[in-house]
Amino acid sequence: MDHAFWLQRWREGRIGFHRNEVMPLLQRHWDSLALARGSRVLVPLCGKSLDMIWLAAQGYRVLGVELSALAIAQFASDNALAMQVHASPLGRHHVAGAIEIIEGDAFALDAATLADCQGVYDRAALIALPPDLRERYVDELHGRLPTDCRGLLITLEYPQAEKQGPPFSVEEVEVRTSFGPRWDVALVERRDILAHEPAFAAEGVSALSTAVYRLQRKDGDRAGAR
């Protein structure tokens, strides 16, 4: 699960995690965060997600982060975006209107870069990571987000022994244990989706659900900020 793994998947077009439509769960639950229009929203491991287009269309400023230059190029091409590029110590920044994507490592984002992110949207980042990296991801990246940041987290749940991730199964107990010290966590929806995911069924997965959580950053110091 290193950088080369994901870069190779993009080169080979093995991107089954990409959706060719906006995530309905995002559209259904985003307004419950009550984020002011114009707020900046972090989208980690963003790929070429159309969810970024939707968020920008709702009046939000989007900050994506993605390892693959190919994913960013496809995002620009697919959406007819002329992206301006500049470099920083974090990587190459691709900017078009309200959308900025940093071509680099999400773990390298510092607290200063994330200081004005009032929102965070995670559909396919947490579940893309194995357990050891999930713990680090929550502690470091989410730990650097500012007090009062709000977000949506979407996970998958299935018997992990029945399939080799990614995507990995992330159960509710793990979400609450990992995020609980710094975030208020509310489960807002869980639904059975096995009938709509034939690839999982073909691999022998016997049960598959998706869960949506609303996150609210607690008051206090950003213990993971550095």
Image (cartoon, grey):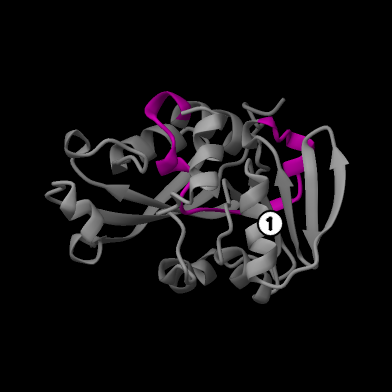
Q: Is residue 89 above or below residue 77?
A: above
Q: For residue 55: magenta?
A: no
Q: Quadrant of residue 105?
A: top right
Residue found at the far bottom of this picture: 57
Q: Nearer the viewer, residue 171 or 203?
A: 203
The residue carrying mark 1 is 73
At a point 42% along the width and 72% down the height, the residue shown is 24
Quarter residue 83 falls in = bottom right
Residue 47 x %, y %: 57, 52
Residue placed at 30% from the left, 56% from the top?
Answer: 210
Q: In terms of secondary structure, where does tag 1 sit? A: helix
Residue plotted at (49% across, 33% down): 5
| Residue nearest the viewer, comparing 164 with 214 | 164
Q: Which region is colored magenta?
A: 108-133
- In the displayed structure, does residue 192 sit left or right of residue 101? left
In the picture as drawn, the residue positioned furthest to the front comes out as 12
- Compared across the picture, whether 141 is left or right of 161 comes to right
Q: Is residue 144 above or below residue 99?
A: above
Residue lying at 34% horizontally and 35% vertically, measured from the top left: 174
Check the picture and name the quadrant holding the C terminus: top right
Residue 62, given in percent of the width and then of the height, sits at 69, 59
Q: How many marks?
A: 1
Q: Position of residue 60 (x, y in %)?
A: 69, 67
